């Protein structure tokens, strides 16, 4: 059993002993801490709660809502929802914050409390540390019987989210409808099965073939939208002669596509394509994390903008986007952040912008993909001895490549013309993760192996 306490939330496997999994006692403890922090921070006694469709969702939802009531906090329960929908709902309801019950792409035995501030954005490192400290000290007091919080259910935010997307100036529902797309949707039997088809209908897409769109929580495959998990989607795109396949993760903040020929568009290129479209109509800067493809930089510079890199993690990307006034940003895992909507990864906004781009482009998805610079990312890791000073090791690697452009804002990233390698230490294991990118798979692997050899040389192994 596993329980991971991080600044952005509490994630763990269901069951086991308290403190070793996401047990009912842990749910109550950390919900209490967040509720107390949110009220102290804002003076508002209202919090939104939404969840994906995973099997433990109802149980965790009941515990979270009851705990917030016990703190004297009024709860708006938006029920089966998506992470971006809850992010939009929090400021709309003028709430102190929000809790999204989802373990994102993790398998069914996982769940999590994702924590939002009053603006509907993930809480910062400083705020997260304070929440964890409150939990550790049990620094919260429950309300008396006359001051218990109320519960209001609100299922209107599906339509409100769709309406907000339709109102975006760069979303052209008329062009999408005229394109007469046929689309297959894989929603991994979570809430994307509700929200994605509803959005497509609102955009004028008449032919939608649902695949795993029943929100039962019984994930038919690993829910992370990676190529090896989307083989059935690829088959269904071909079988239905579809123009496109769409896949989302259980909480609908990650997005990837399958081309009309059954081949993967590539999750790294979701943001690249959407950014390309946005930059054609809005001059400005872009941001992605250090481990995302260089193709976004290429597209940005081609459009006359500046590309900026952020540390890995959505909250870090958002912070950098605000700092450089980026018009589009996100992460290479299929996460699109469009500030004209809100500062959060949103697969629904990504779908609407991508379909508009595709409709206006007028060629098949595979042709659009071929129009972008092609890179390959290799992912490796090296296991080290427990207790080793990994920071000192990375410093020695940095010294070796001091003459190369490099960044230390998140581990160590070294650039070699159009190639790069990113070394990040794990927070939970004695491991260095090694991400490398080049124009071919062989070159990316060679770069990774070179750095692995450097590390072994430094260690004398």
Image (cartoon, rainbow, N blue to C red):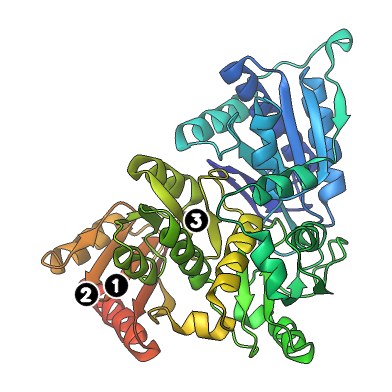
User: Callout 1 environment at 10 Å: few (<14), some (14 to 19), or many (20+)?
Assistant: many
Residue closest to the eye, 171 or 150 = 171
Q: Kindly identify the residue that appears in the image at 77 percent across and 42 percent down.
A: 157
Q: Kindly identify the residue that appears in the image at 77 percent across and 48 percent down.
A: 81
Residue 302 appears at what percent x and percent y?
31, 68
Rendered-image quadrant of the N terminus: bottom right
Q: Are marks 2 and 1 in contact (CB under 8 Å)?
A: yes
**Any mark on residue 93, and which?**
none
N-terminal of the two: label 2 or label 3?
2
At mark 2, the secondary structure is strand
Residue 292 appears at what percent x and percent y?
42, 66
As measured in the structure, the alpha-carbon distance from the residue carrying label 2 to the one carrying label 3 is: 30 Å
Q: Is residue 223 left or right of residue 154?
A: left
Residue closest to the eye, 339 or 79 = 339
To which residue does mark 2 refer? 416
Residue 178 vertical placement versus 77 (above, below): below
As measured in the structure, the alpha-carbon distance from the residue carrying label 2 to the one carrying label 1 is: 6 Å
At mark 1, the secondary structure is strand
Residue 312 visible, this angle: yes
Q: Kindly identify the residue that appears in the image at 54 percent across and 57 percent down.
A: 336
Q: Kindly identify the residue that appears in the image at 27 percent across and 55 percent down.
A: 408
To which residue does mark 3 refer? 428
To which residue does mark 1 refer? 420
Residue 175 vertical placement versus 195 (above, below): below
Q: Is residue 40 left or right of residue 188?
A: left
**Image quadrant where residue 151 sits:** top right
């Amino acid at each position: 059993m596993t329980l991971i306490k991080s600044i952005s939330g509490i994630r763990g496997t269901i069951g086991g002993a308290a403190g070793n999994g996401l047990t009912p006692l842990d749910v109550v403890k950390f919900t209490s801490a967040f509720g107390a922090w949110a009220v102290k921070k804002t003076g508002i006694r209202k919090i939104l709660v939404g969840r994906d469709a995973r099997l433990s969702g109802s149980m965790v939802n009941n515990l979270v809502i009851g705990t917030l009531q016990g703190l004297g906090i009024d709860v708006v329960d938006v029920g089966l929802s998506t992470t971006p929908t809850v992010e939009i709902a929090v400021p709309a309801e003028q709430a102190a914050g929000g809790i999204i019950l989802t373990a994102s792409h993790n398998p069914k035995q996982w769940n999590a409390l994702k924590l939002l501030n009053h603006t509907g954005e993930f809480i910062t490192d400083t705020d997260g540390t304070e929440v964890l400290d409150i939990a550790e000290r049990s620094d919260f007091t429950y309300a008396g019987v006359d001051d218990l919080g109320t519960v209001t259910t609100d299922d209107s935010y599906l339509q409100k989210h769709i309406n907000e997307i339709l109102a975006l100036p760069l979303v052209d529902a008329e062009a999408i409808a005229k394109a007469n797309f046929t689309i297959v949707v894989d929603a991994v039997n979570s809430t994307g099965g509700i929200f994605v088809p509803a959005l497509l209908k609102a955009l004028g897409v008449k032919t939608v073939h649902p695949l795993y769109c029943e929100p039962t929580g019984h994930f038919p495959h690993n829910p992370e939208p990676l190529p090896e998990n989307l083989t059935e989607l690829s088959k269904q795109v071909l079988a239905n002669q579809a123009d496109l396949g769409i896949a989302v993760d259980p909480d609908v903040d990650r997005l990837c596509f399958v081309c009309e020929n059954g081949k993967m568009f590539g999750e790294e290129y979701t943001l690249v394509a959407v950014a390309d479209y946005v930059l054609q109509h809005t001059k400005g800067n872009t941001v992605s994390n250090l481990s995302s493809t260089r193709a976004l930089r290429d597209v940005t510079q081609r459009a006359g903008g500046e590309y900026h890199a952020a540390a890995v993690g959505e909250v870090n990307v958002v912070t950098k986007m605000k700092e450089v006034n980026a018009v589009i940003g996100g992460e290479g895992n299929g996460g699109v952040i469009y500030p004209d909507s809100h500062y959060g990864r949103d697969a629904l906004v990504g779908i609407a912008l991508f379909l508009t781009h595709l409709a206006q482009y007028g060629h098949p998805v595979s042709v659009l993909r071929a129009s972008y610079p092609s890179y390959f990312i290799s992912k490796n890791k090296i296991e080290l001895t427990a207790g080793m000073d990994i920071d000192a090791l990375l410093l020695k690697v940095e010294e070796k490549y001091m003459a190369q452009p490099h960044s230390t804002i998140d581990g160590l990233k070294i650039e070699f013309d159009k190639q790069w390698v990113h070394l990040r230490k794990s927070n939970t294991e004695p491991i260095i993760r090694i991400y490398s990118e080049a124009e071919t798979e062989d070159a990316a692997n060679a770069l990774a192996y070179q750095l692995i050899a450097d590390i072994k040389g430094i260690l004398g192994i």
